[in-house]
Image (cartoon, rainbow, N blue to C red):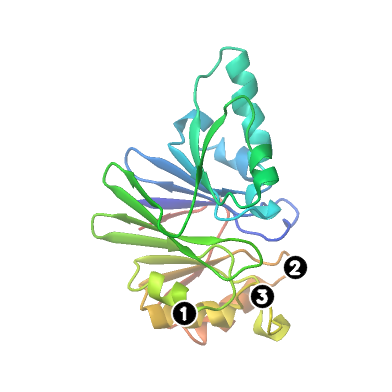
Amino acid sequence: MKLTVLGNNGPYPKPGGACSGYLFETDDKKILIDCGNGVLSRLLKICSISDIDIIILTHLHSDHISDIMVMKYAIGVNKMKGKCNVTIPLYTPTDDYEMVKRLNYNNSFNIIPIEEDTIINLDDIEITFRRMKHPIKTFAVKIRKGKKTFVYSSDTSYNKSLIDFSKNADLLLCESGLLEEDREDNAPHLSAKQAGEIGKKAGVKRLILTHFWPEYNLERVKIEASQSFDSILEISQEMKTYYI
């Protein structure tokens, strides 16, 4: 299993950067998790859209879905031209009905609601979800294949549920949108320190941080997280592939 970071900024990209988007791959399956601005062009450097088996949107904030709004045309227009004939399963929270309607064009996607009890079985891959603490409905994602487990936090404030959901994961991809000095009590994102604490309490083998404020010095982010997490810790790099 491997994970390629297509974009790691939020809520907007740095110059030349991209917002949230991650390509999870096994030998024969490709899963796109989130599709923020700048993600589609990077995805197309790796594979074609028709190679994607399913898409998961963890929540409907623009830095996680912007490029779905253009991907739908890449699929839908080429359908009209007879150049492709795919309808990709797209799993997403559906509480914002008007937003969900805007995600589709010419049957580009088969939209399937995510709830906390949703389970996706894709051959020998199992995907499950856990509701996070964020201003809109947001889900963390867990992918299991064989003895390996990958967890992606999505956007969230500190919560015990993420610790439980991530227990003993081989890799936790965790947002760290803030430095502790900038975090307010009601902040909807984790600080790097909190991300490290979650990784430690969950006993994850490897912690990769993501969803960075574009102006941050990422070395400071890593140093802050390392104060609470003493196993393998990395700052995600765009267009880098991580093996699980």
Q: Is residue 48 visible?
A: no
Amino acid residing under circle 1: Lys
Foreground of the two, 52 or 43: 52
Residue at the extreme left: 146
In the picture of the structure, the residue carrying the numbered disc 1 is 160
In the picture of the structure, the residue carrying the numbered disc 3 is 178
Amino acid residing under circle 3: Leu
Residue 5, placed above or below residue 223:
above
Task: Give the left or right position of residue 155, taking residue 28 as reference.
Answer: right
Amino acid residing under circle 2: Glu
In the picture of the structure, the residue carrying the numbered disc 2 is 215
Q: Which secondary structure lies at badge 2?
A: loop
Q: Which secondary structure lies at badge 1?
A: helix
Which tag is nearer the camera, tag 2 or tag 1? 1
Tell which circle, 3 or 1, labels the residue nearer the N-terminal end.
1
The x and y percentages for residue 218 are 63, 71
Kindly indicate the quadrant of the structure image that contains residue 187. bottom right
